[in-house]
C-alpha cells in the first residue's frame, strides 16, 4: 500500500519540478514565484514568496552594458534607495501586471 502511494506522487513531481513537496503531504506546495519581462527599455526579473508581498528585483537597461541593479520592493518602497524614475516605472508596471496575472 505504501508503494502504491509513492507511485501516485511520482507524476506530480515530474509535472511540477519547481514545486517543493511538504514532507507530510503528497500535495506539491509552490513557495516561490518567479517572473520576468521588459518595459520602457528596461528588463526586470524578480521573485517573491507566495505568502509575502515582498519582491526581489533585478533591473537592467536593454540598450547598454551597465550591470544590473538589485532592489527589494516592499510596502511601496524600493530598498536600497535611490532608483531612477525610468527603472521605477518599469518595475512597478511589471509588478502590477504580475500581481494581476494571479500567478497562473
Image (cartoon, rainbow, N blue to C red):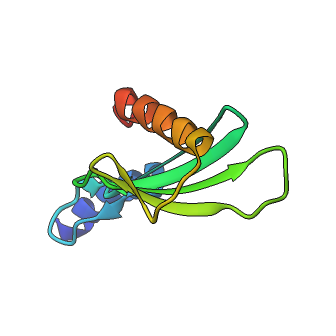
Nearest the viewer among 13 and 44 is: 44
Identify which residue is drawn at 28% across, 52% down.
50
Q: In this view, does 81 lie to the left or right of 68?
A: left
Evaluate whether residue 88 shows in this view: yes
Q: What is the quadrant of residue 52 in the picture?
A: bottom left
Work out whether 27 lies above or below 38. Answer: below
Can residue 7 be seen in this snapshot? Answer: no
Q: Foreground residue, 31 or 7? A: 31
Residue 17 in the image: x percent, y percent?
47, 57
Identify whether 10 is placed above or below 3. Answer: above
Residue 14 point in image, percent of width and height: 47, 55
Residue toward you, 87 or 33: 87
Q: How many numbered tags mark residues here?
A: 0
| 34 relative to 41, above or below | below
Q: Which of 100 and 39 is in front in this view?
A: 39
What x and y, as percent, mark residue 91? 52, 42
Q: Which residue is drawn at 44% across and 38% down?
A: 95
Amino acid at each position: 500500500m505504501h508503494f502504491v502511494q509513492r507511485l501516485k506522487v511520482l507524476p506530480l513531481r515530474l509535472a511540477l519540478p519547481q514545486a517543493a513537496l511538504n514532507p507530510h503531504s503528497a500535495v506539491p506546495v509552490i513557495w516561490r514565484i518567479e517572473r520576468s519581462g521588459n518595459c520602457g527599455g528596461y528588463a526586470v526579473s524578480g521573485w517573491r514568496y507566495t505568502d509575502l508581498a515582498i519582491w526581489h528585483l533585478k533591473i537592467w537597461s536593454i540598450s547598454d552594458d551597465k550591470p544590473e541593479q538589485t532592489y527589494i520592493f516592499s510596502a511601496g518602497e524600493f530598498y536600497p534607495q535611490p532608483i531612477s524614475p525610468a527603472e521605477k516605472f518599469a518595475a512597478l508596471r511589471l509588478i502590477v501586471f504580475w500581481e494581476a496575472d494571479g500567478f497562473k
